[in-house]
Image (cartoon, rainbow, N blue to C red):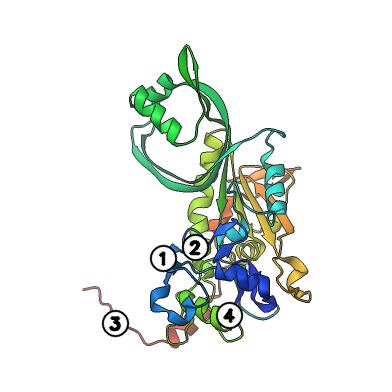
Amino acid sequence: MSKIYELFGYRLDAWGQEAELNCAKAWCPFMNSECDGGGNRYLSAIDLRIHPELARKFPNKQIIQVGICSLQIRDGEQPWIICPRRLLSLRQDSSNYQNHVKQQLADYMKLSKCHNYRVWSEVKMKVATTTDDEQEKSFDYTFDYVIAGSKKILVSDVAKMLGRSEKATQKIAEDNGFTLAKRGELWIEDFPADPIVIIEIMTSSTSGGDKKKRTQISMAFEDAVINPKNHNAPNINYRQVWARMVSQLIVKSQVGMAWNGKTIWLIQDTLANYISTSTALDLSKYLANKSDEVNILAFGYGSKINDKPIIDEIITLDDSNFYAGPIMTGTTKNTERGGFVEIVKIGAEPPKEYLWRSLFLKSSCASFCNS
């Protein structure tokens, strides 16, 4: 049965006083701030005013987020990370637990050393454009992180770009922490500029859970906090996480290239394995040491889950692989290989007999007559 593996960053099977104190603050050790629900899980926030027994674990709080980092479907198996903050947080004050992830990311981004680049999170873009043959197209996506360089630019030029007055543009710059300087005219000293790197983080989704079995995510959290050894958790929704990734992988990679930058996807090795076994894309053929059109960094727990648990341990993700390759078919060292577009293709066709079996084991719902 699925169990919570990490709660607010700490292994539930090695829970100690430090973990207990951290839990009472609902603290995320990776962001180094209170848990925010991991972006997509904010709807699982719990109102402690209607959960009095749970409220005793969180003094002086009324609302908390469900601080589940990962789930373990079966004993001894690799946990599945379900919170993107567990994989990477690029907040200014984030902790050192993700140093390996950040260093690997820096190595493959190939950005200049000893240079500060700014980071933006959850960058939303909804843009209507027209193609060369005058077809109307729309782009409606959100980037997890965008890392960019900087340049000096006149406020008047930025005002023209925004279609706003210089006074309004100056206020936007001040509100968003940009540096202004007066040299005859007013300049923005650190306006966003090349190079551009888009960072996308894809962690696993969970199934809805069963209310009667108390495997819904909020119920699993409540039971685990009150009695860690007596709880059940939802399962992983493999198909949903794959569908979310495949719907964006090619598009966001193409956008990065169109902007003369690159897109790097951060995933867990368990998801990489699932992609390789369920689609025509075998990631092992794309192990690389430099970036390409599509770039994936996969991280995992490695053998640490089989080691004797250390009380109050926060596991660092030190196992990693980098995969890179073309979107379409490419040729490397005189060997033709498919591109990452193969992620949308079937891995292997099931024999037709399995269809007959499935139909025979289920009642038909209607008859169809072409009259």
How much space separates mark 1 and mark 3, taking CA atoms?
Answer: 39 Å
Q: CA distance from mark 3 to mark 2?
A: 45 Å
What residue is pinned by disc 2? 37
Q: Position of residue 148 (x, y in %)?
A: 57, 35
- Neighbourhood count class around disc 1 (C-alpha, 10 Å): few under 14, some 14–19, many 20 upward: few
Q: Is residue 115 visible?
A: yes
Residue nearest the viewer, comparing 194 with 68: 68
Amino acid type of the residue that numbered disc 1 sits on in the rendered structure:
Leu
Say if mark 2 contacts mark 1, CB within 8 Å. yes
Q: Which residue is tagged 4? A: 2
SS at circle 1: helix
Residue 248: image location, x then y, percent? 49, 51
Q: Are circles 4 and 1 on residues that touch, CB within 8 Å? A: no
Q: Residue at x 43, y 36 (%)?
A: 175
- Quick one: label 3, few (<14), some, or many (20+) residues within 10 Å? few
Query: In this image, 95 relative to 349: left or right?
Result: right
Q: Residues within 10 Å of mark 4 (few under 14, many from 20)?
A: some
Q: Nearer the viewer, residue 136 or 290?
A: 290
The residues bearing labels 3 and 4 have C-alpha atoms spaced at a distance of: 37 Å
Check whether the beta carbons of the residues at disc 3 and disc 2 lie within 8 A of each other.
no
Q: State which tag comes first along the sequence, 3 or 2.
A: 2
For the N terminus, the image quarter is bottom right
For the point 53% across and 51% down, the residue is 249
| Upstream in sequence: badge 4 or badge 1 | 4
Residue type at mark 2?
Gly
Q: Is residue 7 visible?
A: no
Amino acid of disc 4? Ser
Q: Nearer the viewer, mark 3 or mark 2?
A: 2
Q: Amino acid at mark 3?
A: Ala
